[in-house]
Amino acid sequence: MHPRARPGARRPRTLADAPVSTPESDALSRRLAKAGFKFVGTTIVYAFMQAAGLMDDHVVGCRRSRAGQDSAPRRRGS
């Protein structure tokens, strides 16, 4: 990923709409498996991409969402 690239943003409306994999995680999973890595399924790779900040798929209105930061009510001390 390019250092100036923005994290992929997918805005699911509910947790049920949130994906467990993406075409990007599918491709990375295949490349890692081909390179000899074990236990690199597409869901695990997608979870890693979320943890590393490569994917930002917080639900619409979530206070942690980049898109929802302006619209979500702020808690005291946050």
Image (cartoon, rainbow, N blue to C red):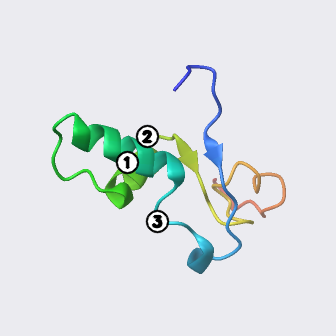
- Checking the image for residue 52, the label placed there is 2
Q: Position of residue 2 (x, y in %)?
A: 56, 21
Q: Which residue is mark 3?
A: 20
Q: Report the residue at 42% width, 51% height from top.
A: 26
- In screen coordinates, is 74 left or right of 18? right
**Which is more foreground, mark 3 or mark 1?**
3
Circles 1 and 2: CB atoms closer than 8 Å: yes
Q: Report the residue at 28% width, 39% height from top.
A: 32
Circles 3 and 1: CB atoms closer than 8 Å: no
Q: Is residue 3 above or below residue 8?
A: above
Q: Position of residue 41 (x, y in %)?
A: 29, 56
Circle 3 packing at 10 Å, graded few (<14), some (14-19), many (20+), is few
- Checking the image for residue 75, the label placed there is none
Residue that extends furthest to the bottom in the rendered view of this protein: 16
**Which is more foreground, mark 2 or mark 3?**
3
Q: Look at the numbered disc 3 and give the secondary structure of its residue.
A: loop
Q: Is residue 6 above or below residue 51?
A: above
Q: Amino acid at mark 1?
A: Phe
Q: Is residue 63 above or below residue 16?
A: above
Q: Nearer the viewer, residue 44 or 70?
A: 44
Q: Which residue is mark 1?
A: 48
Circle 1 packing at 10 Å, graded few (<14), some (14-19), many (20+), is some
Q: Quadrant of residue 57?
A: bottom right
Task: Give the total of numbered labels.
Answer: 3
- Indicate which disc, 2 or 3, sits on the residue closer to the N terminus: 3
Q: Position of residue 29 (x, y in %)?
A: 34, 47
Residue that extends furthest to the right in the rendered view of this protein: 71
